[in-house]
Amino acid sequence: MAGVLTDREQASGTVGATAPAGSSSGSGSRGDTPAPGRRPGRPGRSHQPGRGMSRMRRNDLFWAAVFILPTLLGLVVFYLWPVVRTLLISFTETGPFGGSEFVGLANYRELFGDARLWETMLNTVKFTVVALLGIPVALVIAALLSTEGLRGVRIYRVLYFLPVVTMPAAVGLIWRTLYNGDVGVINALLGLVGIEGTNWLSNPATALYAIAAVGIWLSLGTQIVIFLAAIQGVPKDLYEAAALDGAGRIRQFWSITLPQISPSVFFISVLAVIGALQTFDLIFVMTGPTNPAYPQTETIVAQFYQRGFVENQQGYAAAIALVILVVIVAVTALQFRLQKKWVHYV
Amino acid sequence: MSELTTGLPRRPRPKPLRRRHLGVHAVLILGSVVMVGPFFWEVMTSLKTLGETLTVPPTVFPRSPRWSNYGDVFDTLPFGQMFWNSTIQTLGRVLGQLVLCSMAGYAFARFEFRGRSLLFGLFLSVLMVPSQLFLLPQYEIVAGLGWLNSLQALIVPGLFSAFGTFLLRQFFLSLPRELEEAAKLDGANHWQIFTRIMLPLAKPGLIALAVLDVLWSWNDLMWPLVVNNDPSKMPLSVGLASLIGQFSVDTTTLMAGSVLATLPVLLLFVVLQKQFIQGIAFSGSKG
């Protein structure tokens, strides 16, 4: 699947995991997972010492600078320095007339004593758990799409992929209409089978799950495409052997497909978790501070936005950002640790 | 990128019994209805009168399609301006990244210099940090430059991409070295080799990056939300989102607006399906 990796990297088994952090990727940042033991591009051949060579090296260095410096400077100014700066901001407090003063760990003390942080954290965890439920669905659809001789795969793939390319505002608008308690289609359909619906997005008991379901709907396309590619890579003779042994399709899925593509399943689960932990867009376009169910749906990133850019508490928001970083790193590290138990690398 | 196996199953002989797939199709079609149904509803709603959207039970098809909703989008919202802002933001970021990332990616793939691994590791580290860590200082910088509520605020931080550099580095690594060696013997310098030989070869990689950038940039919500609160400087992603739930604008108008706002990327997706899907698979396939 990782067709563009170099031989060297494939041989040493270091595959970096990099991807957009679901729908909540901000300006240019793509949330990510560390690849253990990556040693990027070592020179393939070593230079002999000598005057000619050193001139060539200097020449290379000059051109490398010309090619890399613009991006390097941009990344330092807009991405690397900001990480340090965020840490610094988290030790300060913005005064009522602007300006900021150093307050030490006060923001963190306030943060951890704040019931709101724990509530938004719990909401975020719920989102993440529901998001993971989408993976089995994507697996089943990908397996069905891999049926031998099935027609229309191309069309199905486009249809399932459609939500991926849709603007969050449009997604929010559409689903608000569908979920509407009085005139929404979902309740009308439920009414046909005798179930009385609710006002899904303003009922505190249902709002979070209703939004999380839309999250699954949004990311299903990406997951299916990746699983589909992984399933194509499973050697066909495995299935033939299993069929000779009398294994049916479902048995083949459990015993061959799933173990064979477990690295992809692992990868998707890492991505899904990182994306869900940063849920913001969906909250912003589907509920809002005036929604009665808002406290039950506000995620930690929504709280970050609220504090940092609405209530002008940059120090507190910076502290939240660092908590988000720690949570993501910890959860991802845990996933990498657990993978040994269930991921089979061929 | 060309080696990515996102293609369709290539099977020489279709099974004689197609009927055996009926069950599979039934499930897949049901799933498709769930995936596409909401879009169908969006288009239908965009053609209804406001009164018709409030009927119980809801009607599926508008009694008589009200195309004027689409005209209202331009009359009651600063839609044209927002569409323009989205276009400039997207074009700016895409073109900037294509130039900058292809240069940096090529250098990491081909030049040998001390500290290359370290520097590349630094680039990759940017990929591992959640975006919330950048936002407050990025806002400070942009505000400090006096760029709040400007188009350059939307574009400039998005010009630089560690992801794009990584993607194109991987692509350049997969290209053969022979052509470069030959050009070097002919006396071409690095810049000539890069622009005349390598860039044309890298076209599939460049298209993949461009397509992903269009998708992410057109739909980007949080950054434009933070820096531009003047509706005349907002891209559509923020402009439409901030109008949702306000009673000043009719739902039908907003629906028509959201159809129009989704259309450019949707059309691009239909035309460049393969590149979209390969790009997404790449961005999520390095595992």
Image: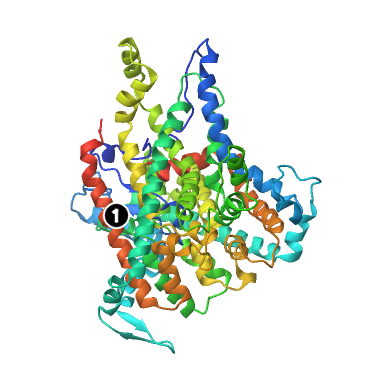
Q: Is residue B163 in view? A: yes
Give the quadrant of the N terminus of chain B: top left
Q: Dot 1 lies on which element?
A: helix
Q: Left or right of A341: which side holds A192?
A: right
Could you say where residue B60 lies in the image, as x and y percent from the top left? Answer: 71, 42
Residue A53 or residue A136, whichever sits in front? A136
In the rendered image, the quadrant that contains the C terminus of chain B is top left
Q: Position of residue A155 (x, y in %)?
A: 58, 31
Taking A275 as reference, is A299 above or below it? below
Q: Residue pushed farthest right?
A: B64
Using the rendered view, name the quadrant where residue B186 is placed.
top left
| Amino acid at the residue labelled 1 | Met
Which residue occupies 37% across, 72% down? A317
> In the rendered image of this protein, does residue A319 appear above or below residue A38?
below
Among all residues in the image, which is located at the extreme bottom?
A97
Going 79% across and 47% down the picture, which residue do you hit?
B65
Q: Label 1 marks which chain's residue?
A: A
Vertical placement of A249 versus B243: above or below?
above
Inspect this view and state whether residue B1 appears.
no
In the depicted view, which residue is nearer to us: B158 or A320? Answer: A320
Q: How is the image coloured?
A: rainbow
Give neighbour class at mark 1: few <14, some 14-19, many 20+ (Cα, 10 Å).
few
Q: Position of residue A237 (x, y in %)?
A: 33, 16
The residue beneath circle 1 is A56
